[in-house]
Image (spheres, rainbow, N blue to C red):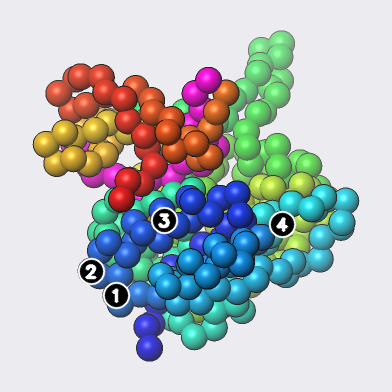
Amino acid sequence: MKQNVIVSLADANYFSLLEELVDSIKRFKESDNIAICILDAGLTEDQKKKLLSKVDEIKPAEWDIEVPDYKVKGKEWLKSQVSRAFLPKYFPNYEKYLWIDCDAWVNDWSCIELYLKACDKGKLGITQTIGPGYKITSKVNWLFGKLAIIKSQNFKHAVKSNIGYDKARKLAFAPHINIGVFSLEKNSKGWNSWQENLSKTLKAGNIFGSEGLAINISVYIDNLETEFLPLNCNWITSNLLPKYDKVQKTFVEPYLPNYKIGIMHLAAGIWKDGKDMRTDKSIQIEIETLDNKKILKSLRYQN
């Protein structure tokens, strides 16, 4: 029996991305020792049949916390914003859980090992969206020299979710945590903390973003013990494009010492001529190489 598991979720529209994620995992021999489980948020029967030859389990995602119908509006993929906080319920036979969004793929297995190590002793293994070259996601507009209007992802979601201005202010300039890749042990207290905060944020706020806000509350307000991993463990391409190492034929961080990208995450999409690379694999964009050349590349996984 495999002790640890990688979990993801997709609907029919993102099946190609999900399949690429699975293939990027399976190419490493080390993947023989870890399970791959999928939450189904609207896959077709043919897609599930194709996946079953590659993964260990597929289960339908549910609304683990009651959400009003008017917020759902037929968008089953929004279940990812709730169900990933309940992974041990869906797949109870594992010790450690590593979630990877389906619009991400594994480029270096060492990052998988880091996530599995990071969640030892109940800690949360995760990355922050802050680092050299990353876009600044928090802004302040000063009024009359002293008053300020705060604009940050955490603050915006916190205010909308009615968790109170005291908590919202504490979160305003805390480095945002991206929930697209994370690890937790089965018996971690982090699950309960996250679920309780998610129940609160869902009541007043939007579904999308609520689970990210909830985990930020768990870390920065409830003081959930957390192991913050380096950016290459969840490289968000919309924040900063990687460079390409033509010698090693791999993507790397754009700044010295140009560490190899471990997990490439296309969160928020890479757009060209109004089209998103996540839904059109033919899209290529201009990126720099380590020898300062420009080349056209797709950032999606290539078999």
Label 4, label 1: how many angstroms apart (C-alpha)?
Answer: 31 Å
Which element is circle 3 on? helix
Return the residue found at the far bottom.
1
Which element is circle 1 on? helix
Kindly indicate whether the residue at mark 2 contacts the one at mark 1 (C-beta within 8 angstroms).
Answer: yes
Magenta-tinted stretch: 257-273
Q: Quadrant of residue 123?
A: bottom left
Kindly report the secondary structure that dominates the magenta region of the rendered protein.
loop
The reply to whether the magenta stretch includes residue 259 is: yes
**In the image, residue 213 lies at what x, y percent?**
64, 50
Which element is circle 2 on? helix
Q: Which residue is mark 3?
A: 21
Q: Which residue is mark 1?
A: 32
- Between 146 and 73, the one nearer to me in the picture: 73
**In the image, residue 248 lies at what x, y percent?**
14, 41
**Is 112 on the left-hand or right-hand side of 59?**
left
Q: Which residue is mark 2?
A: 29
Which disc number belongs to residue 76?
Answer: 4
Kindly indicate whether the residue at mark 3 contacts the one at mark 4 (C-beta within 8 angstroms).
Answer: no
The tag earlier along the polypeptide, 2 or 3, is 3
